[in-house]
Amino acid sequence: MTTDSLSVTFAALADPTRRAILSRLAAGPASVKELSAPFAMSGPAVSKHLRVLEKAGLITRGREAQWRPRRLEAAPIREVAQWAAGFRQFWQVSGDRLDAYLAQFQADQESGKDDR
């Protein structure tokens, strides 16, 4: 069974630890030690999260002398954003309908009109 890249990205983003790691990497490259500092988990557990993110194409591993920094790769996140943007019109129309309903409700309340 073939899994599309969007599904792999969503699966990687489903975990709050991985989202926190990506947020940290948005500020710049970091080592595994730096990435694991805020979490109460073992180094191997953090490494497992990093492998999932790397497999999804969300991070890359570099090599600078003895330092092995991880870097954020934003392309898969852009794909998620483009997919979600397809729902923007739906939410806009829904919000507009709610605004119209609330305005009518408020006008009815101010005029003493009650539909019950």
Image: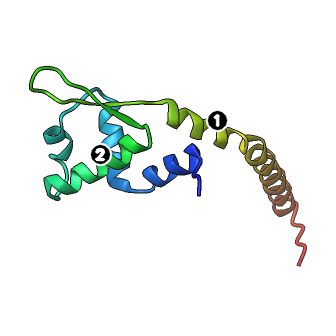
Quarter location, residue 81? top right
The x, y position of residue 32, in whole percent, is: 18, 40
Residue in front for this viewpoint, 96 or 54: 54
Q: How is the image coloured?
A: rainbow
Q: Which residue is mark 1?
A: 82
Q: Quadrant of residue 112?
A: bottom right
Q: Report the number of discs.
A: 2
Check the picture and name the quadrant holding the C terminus.
bottom right
Judge the density around disc 1: few (<14), some (14-19), many (≥20) Cα neighbours within 10 Å: few
Sequence-earlier tag: 2 or 1: 2
Identity of the amino acid at label 1?
Gln
Outermost residue on the bottom side: it is: 116
Q: Nearer the viewer, residue 103 or 50?
A: 50
Q: Nearer the viewer, mark 2 or mark 1?
A: 2
**Label 2 with label 1: CB-CB less than 8 Å:** no
Q: Which residue is mark 2?
A: 50
Query: What kind of residue is marked 2?
Result: Leu
